[in-house]
Image: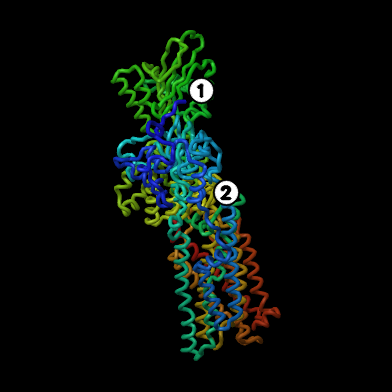
Amino acid sequence: MPESSAAAGPGSTDDPDGPSAVIVPMAGTAARRGAAHDAPAAASAAAAPTSLQVLRSLDSGPRGLLEEQAGERLARYGENTLPAWLPVSWPRRFLRSLRDPFTSVLLCLGLVSAAVASWGTACVTLVLVVVSCLLRSGEEHRADRSTAALRELVATTATVLRRAGPDAAPHARELPVGELVPGDVIRLGPGDLVPADVRLLRAGGLTVHQSALTGESVPVAKHPMDTPPAGLHAAGDGEGPFARPELCFQGSSVASGSGTAVVMATGAETRFAAAYDGSARRRGTSAFDRSVHGISWTLIRFMLLTPPLVLMANAALRGRGLETLPFAVAVAVGLTPEMLPVIVTTALARGASLLAGNHGVIVKRLPALHDLGAIDVLCVDKTGTLTQDRPVVESSLSASGLPDPEALHWAAVNALWTLQLADLPAPDALDEAVLDAAEEREEPLYAYDGVAALPFDPVRRLATAVVRSPGRLGVHTLVTKGAVEAVLERCALDEAERTRLGELAARETANGLRLLAVARAERPARPRPYTTADERGLTFLGFVTLRDALTPSAADALDALKDRGIAVKVLTGDDPGTVARTCRDLGLDPGQVMSADRIDALSDEALAEATDRVTVFARCTPEHKARIVSALRTAGRTTGFLGDGVNDLPAMHAADVGICPRNAVDVARETADVVLAEKDLAAIDHAITAGRYSSGNIATYLRITLSSNLGNVIAMLAAGLMLPFLPMLPAQVLVQNLCFDVAQLAFAFDRPASEVLRWPTVLRPRDFLHFITGFGLLNATADLATFAVLAVALHGSATSGGQDAFHSGWFTENLLTQALVMLLLRTGGRVAGGRGGGPLRVAACGLAVVGLLLPITPLGGLLGMSALPPLYYLLLATVLALYAYGLRTARTRYERKWSRP
């Protein structure tokens, strides 16, 4: 196979002690960074370095480094390995869990309780803090271990040219990639992973997959080039250095061909490793953080007001002083959803564990599971998500544009015999698609005898096979296929016909199809080798059109996401026509596609407005993707981004949730919040479902607990002002809260009704404030009605009017109303009906049993409670029936007012 070369020539030197006037010594990391990256970025200047100049600046030559030189450089620059993330220690992870706002509030309340000698409340509160931190840090540690198990080396070995001495011949050796140093000369072959950032010296038919770096699925042709076209390397133009044909970067892989290259950067200085920069990993506030902070501050305001109000009211109306401080603290604790950190962590950890076990989805950061349930926009790339990373044949057209199988037949003959006669390792994606289509039509490809082949060349942009047709002795048939322009140039056509065919091809391309042009010619049989000069005077046969193969599950997954209220945005580097066709084929209306040039022309405010109505963004660079995601978040959308390459990192950082498949590049897996078993929208749907279930349970707990607690606090304040004694002793408040806490653990294990899955679950402080205020006042009304019932039931009774009886009656009513609220206000639940809610039913029944039986047990006596007359239970049943009716009515009105359209 012929090779192009740019390194060797007259005047080149292999001697590291060559002319010192042109040697650019490298002193440390900064110099090496300059050699590796600044030179490519500055290559638009008139004095762009040639391959020879690059070799000399690296103190190397085409024959490779001396072993002694390589050893010195390895000691100076370090191993060619990616920087690893240090694992977070258990103590640090535990302390980091305390930054959760609710956990911090609970910790402060525990300390205040200890300060006022309320030891029971302090102990229970602090135990809950420790349990919550242990659960969260333990689950995140498990996720980190699962992710670490997915780590894999970018490459293991490389073929390197090294010399034992200045006069020794170079020897090709297989060395571990970690031993590569700048200046090493390496060989690349089909299937090899590029082990470092390199510049090509020689190449033959070399194509490279750069999808991990650029997102482009089609292999890119690479070849040496010492005089690049003006403007190609200018900063910001096109794809920048990735578009340069003479450069290959770590993270890419060789699709076909071979080459020799010099290593320009290794280790932390490669573009691939630059994504590990810690500053780039800092993400803004997530949806979970925003929700929790908003609710936390609403709650903190209530809590800060409660103790002073209790103290002032009792001092002004009852003349009580600091002896009411423990009661005031107990009231503040009663307002606090002290189980929230435990419920949140348990619900999220359980959801993450089920996802990992059932669907292979790893949630690395527990709050990210809530964010998954809250996302209303999912940004995806086209390749690998909506489409498979391969083309399929759409049609075979004649020169007039009508369906005709002849073009496909001869294209398949070309693909088969080029593959066999040129000794290629494997067909490229287009040839494979052509051969698959021909096999489906049972084309007789093996009826021909192969004679010669001129394989695809990135300069010619076509391939030719020479075959002997059945029964045509003395005649050879040349079959050529390739790029439309390249094939038309070699056909015997007048200018008008060539223009017409070009316009036909342009129309098909505008419809999102790729085209292969096919032509043939018959020549007298000859023993002489065939060359590219024979590719002239061809007869044009037609076109083979190809499209991207759709991912089988994509259409159903898109429908499922739409049903869940999630808008899918496609951010791709592909052509607008191609991605629009893919979207239409999947039933996703692409609307008006926005290209990168239009994105650049918009301000951030205008882009935020445009993202709401645009579905497809084409020709996007990594910076465009990140800017679009940021614009969506600015517009108030909760955004997830699915990516798998280095080019996706900026957008993953910008999103609320970064998602990647397990076969993504190493740095993408380290950055992502969620790691999927495979790049599949169906897997994301499973993760979103788990997130909404967990978030729905957390929201239910918050609504029920905060509304009940607010009602109890209002009733306590009222009772404290009306009664000559404390309405409930601190010990009784503590036991009541313990009963609530144990019962509320059921929320973490509940399975909400399917209504929860219909819309993103967002914890909005304003909605919560409306809910807890309305239902809290209803709860307080029930408590005040219970006071009236107690006054009637205890008046003139043998157990008359004592404080113990009052404490018992209110204690029982509190637990029974809490059980009712758990059943009637469950998210998406139907009262005591339908499926699901099992754990909540059991917990509610247990709470009711404790409320009815505890006051008459010896433990009730120790807590200052006594038995109640039968009349009380009869009147209480009436109050509870009215309360249940009020809850049903209020819930119906609330859902009608606040439900989504």
Seen in the picture, residue 703 relative to 30 is either above or below; the reply is: below
Three-letter amino acid code of the residue under disc 2: Leu
SS of the residue under disc 1: helix
Q: State the CA–CA distance, disc 2 to disc 1.
A: 38 Å
* Residue 863 as seen in the image, left or right of residue 597: right
Amino acid type for the residue under numbered disc 1: Leu
Q: Which numbered disc covers residue 458?
A: none
From the viewer's perspective, tell me whether residue 48 is left or right of residue 437: left
The x, y position of residue 697, in whole percent, is: 55, 61
When asked about the image quadrant of residue 811, the answer is bottom right
* Residue at which label 2 appears: 150
Residue 380 lies left or right of residue 594; in this view the side is right
Q: Which colour scheme is used?
A: rainbow
Disc with the residue nearer the chain's start (2 vs 1)? 2
Vertical comparison of 751 with 525: above or below: below
Quarter-wise, where is residue 224 in the image? top left
- Neighbours of disc 1 within 10 Å: few (<14), some (14-19), many (20+): many
Question: Which residue is disc 1 drawn over?
Answer: 416
In depth, the one of 58 and 397 nearer the eye is 58
Q: Which residue is drawn at 60% across and 72% down?
A: 127
On the question of residue 513 being in view, the answer is no
User: Percent x, y for residue 71?
Assistant: 52, 46
Residue under the point 37% across and 51% down: 627
Residues 295 and 16: in front is 16
Q: Residue shown at 51%/34% (left/top)?
A: 169
